[in-house]
Amino acid sequence: MKPIELSLYASRKSLDAPLRCPNCCHGYKHKASLYNHMTYECGVEAMFECTICGKKCKRKMHLIYHLGRVHSILRSNIVFVSKTGYKILDK
Ligand SMILES: [Zn+2]
Ligand SMILES: [Zn+2]
């Protein structure tokens, strides 16, 4: 590979994913995506637990999706009372 090609390749690659997680080297295009990854995914215990079946989720969105799909609970009936704590309103 000629040096010019190598540098083109390198710059394109860094354009695709300029931000890197320092823990696992996952690449992200957006600061917010990297932040979400580091906060909720990378080396983090699953913090959101389904109070009905005990399934654990790493992301709030995954839990909300799980509650809706598996337990038919509407998003509007899920009220978060702390970062990971929530209650389900009666219909
Ligand atoms: Zn990571
Ligand atoms: Zn569940």
Image (tube, rainbow, N blue to C red):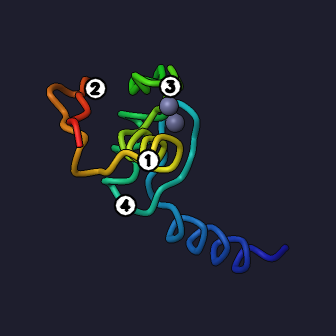
Structural crowding at the residue carrying mark 4, measured as other residues with C-alpha within 10 Å and reported as few (<14), some (14–19) or many (≥20)? few
Mark 3 and mark 1: Cα distance apart in space = 17 Å
Give the residue type that dot 4 points to: His
Height in image: 49 above or below 37? above
Residue 86, horizontal then vertical, whole percent: 24, 28
The image's mark for residue 84 is: 2
The image's mark for residue 56 is: 3
Q: Nearer the viewer, mark 4 or mark 3?
A: 3
Structural crowding at the residue carrying mark 2, measured as other residues with C-alpha within 10 Å and reported as few (<14), some (14–19) or many (≥20)? few
Query: What residue is at 43 percent from the left and 47 percent from the top?
Result: 72
Q: Mark 4 or mark 3, which has the lower sequence index?
A: 4
Mark 3 and mark 2: Cα distance apart in space = 11 Å
Q: Nearer the viewer, mark 2 or mark 4?
A: 2
| Residue annotated with mark 4 | 30
Q: Nearer the viewer, mark 3 or mark 1?
A: 1
Q: Mark 4 or mark 1, which has the lower sequence index?
A: 4
Query: What residue is at 67 percent from the left and 73 percent from the top?
Result: 9
Residue farthest along the left direction in this orientation: 81
Query: What residue is at 53 percent from the left and 52 percent from the top?
Result: 27
Q: Secondary structure at mark 1?
A: loop
Q: Mark 3 or mark 1, which has the lower sequence index?
A: 3
| Residue annotated with mark 1 | 72
Height in image: 10 above or below 60? below
Q: Indicate the quadrant where residue 81 lies.
A: top left
